Each structure stands twice: as structure tokens, then as C-alpha cells.
Image (cartoon, grey):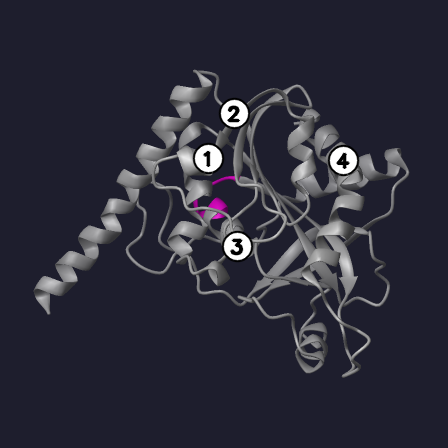
């Protein structure tokens, strides 16, 4: 038992070597200027990457230790450049537990961004709306979350990155939320604010689960984001999150209310321009 435990700890400690190798490779491609903001783009929201100026595009397949995106609507590119006058790095596509990746790989890019010098993390996702006041196409500022994923901090602590027991009272930065609401009002666009619940997937929720999650306080449902936010807060990053409401969650067992991944991507794409402009203005305000 002692030998197997030692090997487990060795494997866990090798995480820093992998993260360091990924960050070193990216730094070789982008130069010395540190990015201020990291952005994670969800299903169908990769269009924001096309608005990054002076872009250096690095496919995930070229980055040592990086997994590959297999989900619909995830291009699989790491982009470095300028947005809102600030230096940023953006992920066109994220990784999910339902793709077979452990939480250490799902969240690895956040730690890589931290090593690159990022101080803020902007996360986005396509989500199903449970709040009856929400409409397809709405942008929802995430004010808090409920995570049903295995906690990505389980295991030996990354002492180099953060504390053993990080606080999650303000997982989503209150100052950034207030700024985003003000910017949305100036833009004249409809924004909601609510609680995002993330489950492992890849199945869409049953009507009974939707009703249960809504009773628990969830305004929108998805299959990502919360593990990245947990790791970001562990690393000391300030987080802003946004969901695009791409469908209404089914609360009744009626076959006509059929969820489809391609429809979700199309709905997200239709809202991506508004989200991109809001992100651009918010980043410019930092």
C-alpha cells in the first residue's frame, strides 16, 4: 500500500511538469507580453476569437500535454492577441468530463493561463433556461453556481497555485458583474442574472431533474464551467461568467420538446456577437 500511495503522489506531482511544459511552449509562440485576461469560449461561442486583433493561433494538438476538444461547436484553438485594448488569451473550445477527461485535464488550461500571467478569467457557455422569465437568445450573467461535478481540487493540493481550502463566497467577481450590467444598459441589450447549475452530462436533463434543479434555485443548466471557476478561484483569479440561453429546458414528458446539440450551437452563434461586444467593453474597462 505504501508503494502504491507513493506512486499516486508522484503522478499527481507530475501535473506541474505538464502545466509548465504547456505554458513554456505557448510562451515561445507568443513572446514576452503577458496576457491580462483569459477567456474560455463555450459551445457555438468561438466567434469571439475572430474579433481578437493581432491574433496568434495555436491549435491544441500542438501544445504539449493539452487534450483535444471533441464536443460540437468547439474549434480547439488557443488564441493570443488584443481585445478591448488589452492582451488576452482565449480558448476556442473547452474540455469536458463527459469526453472522458479527468478533472485535472478539464481544468488544466486555467492553471496554464495562470502561469502565463493572467489575472482575470472570463468564462462562457451555452445553457438551457429553467427560469420561466428567460427567453432563447438571452445573455445571463452568472452570479453564482451549483456544481454537480467531482471537485477538481480533490487530491494533493497544488501548493504552488493556492490554498487547500479556497473560499467560494464570491466566486464571480461582484465588481465585474456591476460593470457588465452597466455596459449592457449602455448597449441597450437584454441581460439576465442568475444561478448556473452544471452537471456531468452528456445526457440532457430529464423533466423531473429540471424541476428539481429549478426548485434548488438554478436559472440555467449546462455541463461545464464550474470546475474551471473553482480552479480559477483557487489560483486567485477574478472571474466573470456568462451563459447564453440556447433552449428552454423540458419540464414535461412531451416528445415535441426535443433537445438537440446542433440547435444549441446555432442559438449560441446567433447571440455570440452581443456577448463578444459586451466582453470587449468589459475587458476595456479593467
Residue drawn at 81 percent across, 35 percent down: 183
Rendered view: 22 above or below 73: above
Q: CA distance from mark 1 to mark 3?
A: 20 Å
Q: CA distance from mark 1 to mark 2?
A: 8 Å
Q: SS for tag 2?
A: loop
Q: Which residue is mark 4?
A: 278
Q: SS for tag 4?
A: helix
Rendered image: mark on residue 168: 3
State the extent of the magenta-drawn residues as a range: 232-237
Q: Which residue is mark 1?
A: 113
Asked where in the image residue 4 lies, by quadrant, the reply is bottom left
* Precedes in sequence: disc 2 or disc 4: 2
Rendered image: mark on residue 35: 2
Asked where in the image residue 250 lies, by quadrant, the reply is bottom right
Q: Nearer the viewer, residue 265 or 240?
A: 265
Classed neighbour count for the residue bearing mark 2: other residues with Cα under 10 Å, few (<14), some (14–19), many (≥20): many
- Res. 50 in view: yes
* Precedes in sequence: disc 3 or disc 2: 2
Amino acid at each position: 500500500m505504501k508503494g502504491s500511495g507513493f506512486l499516486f503522489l508522484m503522478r499527481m506531482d507530475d501535473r506541474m511538469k505538464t502545466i509548465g511544459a504547456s505554458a513554456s511552449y505557448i510562451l515561445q509562440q507568443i513572446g514576452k507580453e503577458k496576457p491580462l485576461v483569459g477567456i474560455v469560449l463555450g459551445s457555438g461561442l468561438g466567434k469571439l476569437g475572430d474579433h481578437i486583433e493581432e491574433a496568434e493561433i495555436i491549435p491544441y494538438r500542438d501544445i504539449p500535454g493539452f487534450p483535444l476538444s471533441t464536443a460540437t461547436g468547439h474549434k480547439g484553438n488557443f488564441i493570443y492577441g488584443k481585445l478591448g485594448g488589452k492582451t488576452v488569451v482565449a480558448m476556442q473550445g473547452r474540455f469536458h468530463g463527459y469526453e472522458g477527461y479527468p478533472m485535472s485535464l478539464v481544468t488544466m488550461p486555467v492553471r496554464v493561463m495562470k502561469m502565463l500571467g493572467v489575472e482575470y478569467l472570463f468564462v462562457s457557455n451555452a445553457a438551457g433556461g429553467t427560469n420561466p422569465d428567460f427567453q432563447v437568445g438571452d445573455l445571463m450573467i452568472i452570479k453564482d453556481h451549483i456544481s454537480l461535478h467531482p471537485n477538481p481540487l480533490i487530491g494533493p493540493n497544488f501548493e504552488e497555485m493556492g490554498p487547500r481550502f479556497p473560499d467560494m463566497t464570491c466566486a464571480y467577481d461582484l465588481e465585474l458583474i456591476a460593470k457588465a450590467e452597466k455596459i449592457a444598459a449602455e448597449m441597450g441589450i437584454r441581460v439576465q442574472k442568475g444561478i448556473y447549475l452544471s452537471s456531468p452530462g452528456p445526457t440532457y436533463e430529464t423533466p423531473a431533474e429540471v424541476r428539481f434543479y429549478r426548485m434548488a434555485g438554478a436559472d440555467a443548466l449546462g455541463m461545464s464551467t464550474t470546475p474551471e471557476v473553482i480552479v480559477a478561484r483557487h489560483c486567485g483569479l477574478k472571474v466573470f461568467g456568462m451563459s447564453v440561453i440556447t433552449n428552454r429546458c423540458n419540464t414535461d414528458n412531451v416528445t415535441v420538446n426535443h433537445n438537440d446539440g446542433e440547435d444549441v450551437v446555432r442559438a449560441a452563434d446567433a447571440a455570440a456577437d452581443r456577448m463578444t461586444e459586451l466582453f470587449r467593453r468589459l475587458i476595456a474597462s479593467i
